[in-house]
Structures are given as structure tokens and as C-alpha cells.
Amino acid sequence: MRSVKTFLVFGLALMATLVGLDVYLQLAEIQTPMETRIDQRLGPTYIPNKKITRFTEGFFIGSANAYGYMGPSIPPARSGLERRVLLLGDSFVLGHTVLPRHYFGRWLEARLREVSGEVYHALNFGKADFNFWNMYQYYKDFAGGFDHEAALFFVGAGDLIPARQIATDLYPVVRLDGDALVIDRSFRNSRTFGFYKTIEPIMTNSALLRLMFNAFKMVKRGELASVVLDRFAPKRQESDEGPDPGTPPQAVEMPALSRAILRDLARDPRNVLVIQRSLAKELRDEVRAAGLPMIDLGACLDSLQAAGQDPYYWPITKTHGHWNHATHPIIGAYLADQLIARGLVRPRESSESRPEEASSPK
């Protein structure tokens, strides 16, 4: 009887300790719970107004907005004369390595406002691990419903030719049905979906579980030794998130699904493909054949390299990964100038040609 009582006391004390630790992690904003829930139409989506904290290559603290995407809360319909640019891509576009005010989308807005005299908003629809097929589905189902002047799809070779569609038991899947593009939502019938929906209330409210999930991913990526041993850890191969810009792209063949998506996106002149990593000539030719405009970040990133700045290097954590703080403003300004050069954004006209400009809202 005494052993049972001791066990119960120990169990209650352990539970109280874990709950207290969980509350501390959240109040101190050291770790936040899972920020996504599984939507039956969209798959994993950000919980509106959910706080998010990240400590990876850099530092991020912010939240999803009231509409369930990152950045300022801009509704689907315009409320005035403001203009919008949609940003779709993977974790580079998501930007969870810099504070929101340093994000390249804010620099893009500022540059467009400076040149055009109009109020611009860059809407961040980036999602970690997204490939081109995921971006297309998210654009069709969600992001494309927001009024906009341009939609930028950020891709590399691995996005146009993905090894697989990520988490098909949790995400909608784009398929070709003959010549037609269809979005398959059979994921909601999977066991994985049912399991996640069962544990979702716990995962989205427990910082400890999110911490364990992050630790699992860290071990899977082979980062445990570097985190525990720091400078004494054996050297490992750098992440391929930030490839050497000088590496020649290999000859590859584009899948029929990517080709069909390119053709469909090219029907809307507002859509632009942004090349964020090296792309083989064959893939560039496919994009041109589809008629989809391209903006290549290569020249922008090469200029940083030539100036002795590695756009993927984080001096504090001594790692290579996503675009660093110094790179975000350069990319934002470069994209703005490219959009203007392609006529997707009108430059500011003189006061003689636009007499009403002085009274228009900025």
C-alpha cells in the first residue's frame, strides 16, 4: 500500500513539474506549441493569431495573422487603394529565421512604395518543405483568393522536380487526370489524418511536445552531436539549404505534372516564377516554353558573394542555411526592381501627368 502511495505521489509531482515547465516555456516564449492544425480542405494550416518562436540559424518571434498566414493581417478583399504581391514558396519564403521587421517582404513593400507612390503589401504564404506542386495547390485553394497584382512562386530544381509529394496522408495532392489538373483530398480518409486530429488539441497547446518534436527532427538531421558538443562535435556535411551558387546544375527532365502547372499558371499574366537556386538549362527552357515570366535571384546573390558576403552564412551560429539578415533587404529591393521592369508595377508618374496624386492615400 505504501509503495502504491509513493508511486502516486511521484506521478502527481512529475505531472505538476511537467505542467509547470510547459507553462514556463510558453510564458517566457522559449518554445511555443505546434502552430498548425490539419484542415480538411487545405491540410496543415496556421492557427490564426497563434504565437510562434524559433531559434535556428537566426531568431524569429511572431505569429500567424487572423487569416491564417504569416505577416500583417491583410483580408482577401481590398479595403482601399492598396496593392498586393503574393509570396509562395518553402521555408526561405516563410522566413522563420529573421524577425518579422527584417523579412524580405517588408523591404519589397518599402521599395515598391518608394518607386510607385502606391501602398503595397507583400503577403507571405510560405510553408516549410513546400515544393512547386504544394505551392500550386495552396495558391488555388487559398492564397489566390486574395486580391493581388502579382503572385511570385519561389522555386529551385528540387521544387520543380520533387522527389516526392510531402506527407500525402496530411496534404491535398495535385494530380493529372488526362490533361486536366485536379486536387485530390483523399488524405482526410487516411489513418495518419485521423491520428493527428485526435492528438491535435494536445499538440497545439503543449510546448513540451513541440520541443520533443523539434528534438526528433534534430536527431533525424544528424544535428544532435553539434548541439550537445558544440565546437567539440565532429564536422558534418553542410545542409543543402544553401547550395554553392557556382555549382553547375545537372541536366534533368521536368515531370509532366510540373509542366502542366507551369502552363496553367502562365494563363494569368500576374504569375511569376522566381528562381532562388541554380536551375538547369533544360528546366529554364521548359519555363520559357510555358510562357511563365521568370525572375532569377542568381545575379542578386552572386553580387553578394562577389562582395565577400555569403548570403547563406549565419556568423552567430556558424552555420549555412537560409538567407541571412544581410540578404533579406537585398532580395526585397531586387524583386521590387524586377517587378517594375516587367511592368507588373507602375512607377510613380510626375505630378503634371497625375494631378490627383497629391491627395491620394499613401
Image (spheres, rainbow, N blue to C red):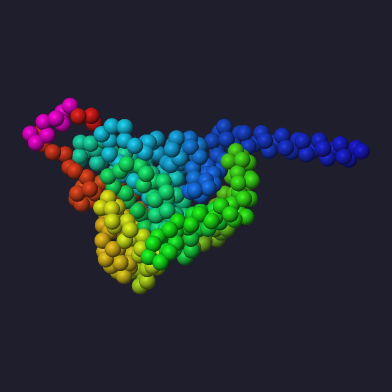
Residue 308 pos. (x, y %): 31, 55
As drawn, the residue found furthest toward the left would be 352
Q: Where is 326 relative to 361, above or below?
A: below
Left or right of 8? Residue 237 is left
Q: Residue at x 54, y 36 (%)?
A: 29
Left or right of 300? Residue 41 is right
Q: Residue at x 66, y 33 (%)?
A: 20
Q: Residue at x 32, y 41 (%)?
A: 147
As drawn, the residue found furthest toward the top would be 359
User: What secondary structure predominates along the stretch shown in magenta?
Assistant: loop
Q: Which residues are magenta?
A: 352-359
Quarter of the image with the C terminus in it: top left
Q: Does the stretch in magenta take in 41?
A: no
Q: Nearer the viewer, residue 95 or 356?
A: 356
Q: Nearer the viewer, residue 64 or 317?
A: 64
Q: How many marks?
A: 0
Q: Residue at x 48, y 48 (%)?
A: 42
Q: Where is residue 37, by image quadrant? A: top right
Q: Is residue 304 visible?
A: no
Residue 286 pos. (x, y %): 30, 67
Q: Where is 277 relative to 150, above or below?
A: below
Residue 44 pos. (x, y %): 51, 48
Residue 232 pos. (x, y %): 56, 56
Quarter of the image with the N terminus in it: top right
Q: Does the stretch in magenta take in 353?
A: yes
Q: Is residue 166 visible?
A: yes
